[in-house]
Image (spheres, rainbow, N blue to C red):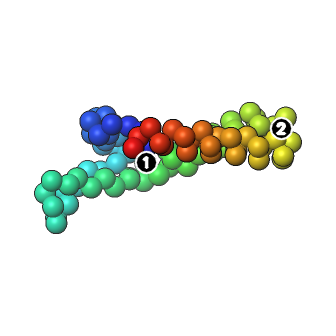
Amino acid sequence: MLVPGANITGIAKRLAKDGFIIKKSDPRDERVTLLEITPKGKRTLKHIEKEKDDSLELMLKNLSNDEKLELLDKVKRILKNGMSFRK
């Protein structure tokens, strides 16, 4: 996800405060906090997914199938190259 651990903690706190997730202690390891998505969080994700799909469809509507596949290949290569920086 390319987000530092400290930022994840802040994001999780805000998501819990807004009712999108529930934070629970791990009974096997007190150092671990488990995150569980709430029904509100699931509804929101479904809504976001539809908006993302609609936006992507609009952005790619003038590309041929071959152009879409070529773009996908290039994006995959860019992401793979970016992952090498994290090692």
Q: Locate the C terminus and report the quarter of the image it occupies.
A: top left
Quadrant location of residue 47? top right
Left or right relative to 74: residue 41: left
Disc 1 crowd, CA 10 A, few/some/many (<14, 14-19, 20+): some
Residue type highlighted by circle 2: Leu
Residue 5 image offset from top left, x and y in percent: 29, 40
Report if the CB atoms under discs 2 and 1 are less than 8 Å apart: no
Q: How many marks?
A: 2
Residue 51, can we see it? yes
Specify which label sits upstream in the sequence, 2 or 1. Answer: 1
Judge depth for marks 2 and 1 and give the one in front: 2
Residue 23 image offset from top left, x and y in percent: 26, 50
Q: Which residue is mark 2?
A: 63
Q: Which residue is mark 1?
A: 41
Left or right relative to 70: residue 43: left
Residue 48, can we see it? no
State the residue at coordinates (83%, 38%): 63
Residue 81 image offset from top left, x and y in percent: 54, 40
Could you say which is closer to the camera, residue 49 or residue 2? 2
Q: Secondary structure at mark 1?
A: helix
State the residue at coordinates (43%, 48%): 40
Q: Secondary structure at mark 2?
A: loop
Q: Locate the N terminus and report the quarter of the image it occupies.
A: top left
Could you say which is closer to the camera, residue 31 or residue 83? 83
Could you say which is closer to the camera, residue 51 or residue 10? 10
Say the numbered circle drawn on residue 13: none
Q: Above or below — where is 34 with respect to 72?
A: below
Disc 2 crowd, CA 10 A, few/some/many (<14, 14-19, 20+): few
Distance from Cα at disc 2 to Cα at disc 1: 33 Å
State the residue at coordinates (34%, 55%): 36
Residue type highlighted by circle 1: Gly
Q: Above or below — where is 25 with respect to 17?
A: below
